[in-house]
Amino acid sequence: MDEELAKAIGIYATQGLQQFHEYISSKSKKELQNMLAELIKMYMADKNSSTLREIVTVRVAGYEHSGEKLGYNGFRYEQGRKIVCEVKPVNVSEEGEKKLEGGGNFTDYTWRRFERDKQENPNILVSGFVSGKLIYILEFPFNTPSFKKKIEEQLKKKLPKGNEPGEYTRSVSFNYKDYKDYARAVFIEPKLENYRDHLRKHFYEFLKKLRRDAHGN
């Protein structure tokens, strides 16, 4: 971490807001730019927190971010009707072996939540990042038949007794094959080829096709 940024964080945490403002005010424009860039870079690539990647996905897709902990991640209004979205961002490292495949997961999932999601039918926003750099955002409705079937099959296997009190499955997952026929490309990195090594081969070809279809060539 940049030394000036580390010092600023330390002052904020130990001395309070006034001292933090005084320290920040003493810095040049260039120093502040470097500190902000370092902070964003650090949290965009943070493997333990997806908050910034979630916010970026929501805003690029045209939704307002929601801070509700137990609700959906974003919303917008269309002709007076509220449309909600659920974000599934995945980040891989430039140096790592893990590759993006258009997948995601629901954590601590239950039959009750599944029933709510079927009723609300949120738009699912699947996004992929490479060390914090946005590569794609794909959108499709929760009630996409193949996708909904994939989630339900996992629930039947992991929670065969239905809505038992306190029962939940740690994770149910999916990949692009479960929604590919219903996906809309919200964003695809123009220089996608530069990130080919960080994408599964078939998923890379799928993104190229979506991009061609979107641009008519």
Image: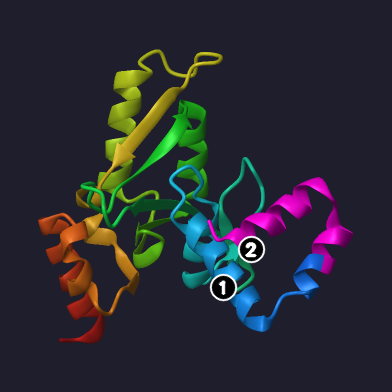
- Tell me the kind of residue under disc 1: Asn
**What residue do we see at 47% from left, 22% from top?**
168
**Picture coordinates of residue 28, whole percent (x, y):** 69, 80
Q: Where residue 131 sits: x, y (%)?
A: 37, 59
Q: Nearer the viewer, mark 1 or mark 2?
A: 2
Residue 129: give x, y in percent of width and height. 36, 60
Q: Main secondary structure of the magenta part?
A: helix
On the rendered structure, is 8 left or right of 162?
Answer: right
Q: Which residues are magenta?
A: 1-22
Whether residue 82 is visible, yes or no, is no
Residue 184's quadrant in the figure?
Answer: bottom left
Element marked by disc 2: helix
Q: Residues within 10 Å of mark 2 (few under 14, many from 20)?
A: some
Residue 30 visible? The answer is yes
Report helix, strand or loop for mark 1: helix
Marking on residue 34: 1
Question: Tag 2: residue type?
Answer: Glu
User: Would you identify the image quadrant in which residue 63 lies?
Assistant: bottom right
Q: Is residue 8 magenta?
A: yes
Residue under the point 21% across and 58% down: 198
In the foreground, 112 or 176 = 176
Is 48 above or below relative to 29?
A: above
Inter-mark Cα distance, 1 to 2: 9 Å
- Residue positioned 22% across, 51% down in the render: 99
Q: How is this picture coloured?
A: rainbow
Taking the image as shown, residue 40 lies to the left or right of residue 206, namely: right
Q: Determine which residue is flagged by label 2.
A: 4
User: Considering only order in the chain, which callout, 2 or 1, is on the residue closer to the N terminus?
Assistant: 2
123 or 42: nearer the eye? Answer: 42
Q: Is 27 on the left or on the right of 143, as rendered?
A: right
> Circle 1: is it few (<14), some (14-19), or many (20+) Cα within 10 Å?
some
Quarter of the image with the C terminus is bottom left
